[in-house]
Image: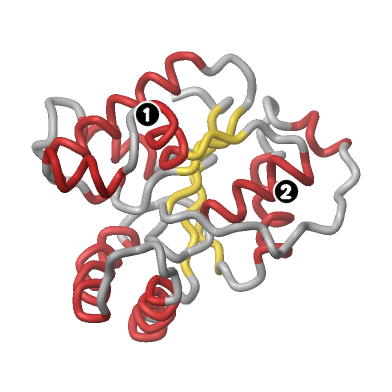
Amino acid sequence: MTTAIAHILGPGGAGKSTVGALLSTNFGIPVVDLDIYFIENVGDISHFIRTYGYVAYARKNVLNYRAIVGKILDPTVVVLSSGFMTYPSDLDASYSELVTEISRHSLSALLLPSFETEECVALIVHRQLQRPYLDCDREREEARIRYRLPIFMGFQCQRFLSSSPAELAIEIWAFVATSRQFKSFTSLTATTPDQSCCQGNN
């Protein structure tokens, strides 16, 4: 996988979409948010899942990712959906290989609100329940993060605490700028990130 692509991954509520938006707005880094891409090119995610099922959504999301990556020419940050790295391993013939490649990529950044399991679960559940546009409940959200968190923690990529979006955006900016392809962005002057930026579903 080319180092011209960086990934931001993590569970829902970890701040991925917020950080992605700040990287684009304040540092001029090209960012593609997989959730936004799905909505703009396929339709409402919840409606798609209700109509076709979660596995069909997962397959379509992976196809979208491959289409995006296949067109990337300039250094780009790809913000992955929260479940993208935790789909069924037999989703398609090469999905497991893709997950392994992303999880070991030198420019993959895992965002978590805490590295302690119980605190992380509590924070993620709280954040998700604060989003009125999500059709969720505490029991379901807790079950989801408890299933996904061990998978995320098993990845070998760089981890970042997602406490302050402003500070985190600067950390991710510096992280991707270690790559030769992203190095041009280090010459940009950092502005004060807009912490009121809308947070995405992921």
What x and y, as percent, mark residue 10? 41, 57
For label 1, the residue is 65
x 69%, y 50%: residue: 22
x 72%, y 48%: residue: 174
x 34%, y 85%: residue: 118
* SS at mark 1 in the image: helix
x 27%, y 49%: residue: 46
Along the horizontal axis of the image, is 22 left or right of 2? right
> Please, what is the three-letter code of the amino acid marked with disc 2?
Ala
Instruction: Report which quarter residue 195 is drawn in.
Output: bottom right
Q: Is residue 42 above or below residue 150?
A: above
Label tally: 2
Viewer-proximal residue, 202 or 69? Answer: 202
What x and y, as percent, mark residue 94? 19, 27
What x and y, as percent, mark residue 99? 29, 39
From mark 1 to mark 2, how far is it between C-alphas? 24 Å
Along the horizontal axis of the image, is 41 left or right of 171? left
Q: Which of marks 1 and 2 is nearer the N terminus?
A: 1
Viewer-proximal residue, 103 or 149? Answer: 149
For label 2, the residue is 174
Viewer-proximal residue, 14 or 3? Answer: 14
> Please, what is the three-letter code of the amino acid marked with disc 1?
Tyr
Q: In this view, does 150 lie above or below 88?
A: below
Along the horizontal axis of the image, is 148 left or right of 198? left
Q: In which quarter of the image is the N terminus?
A: top left
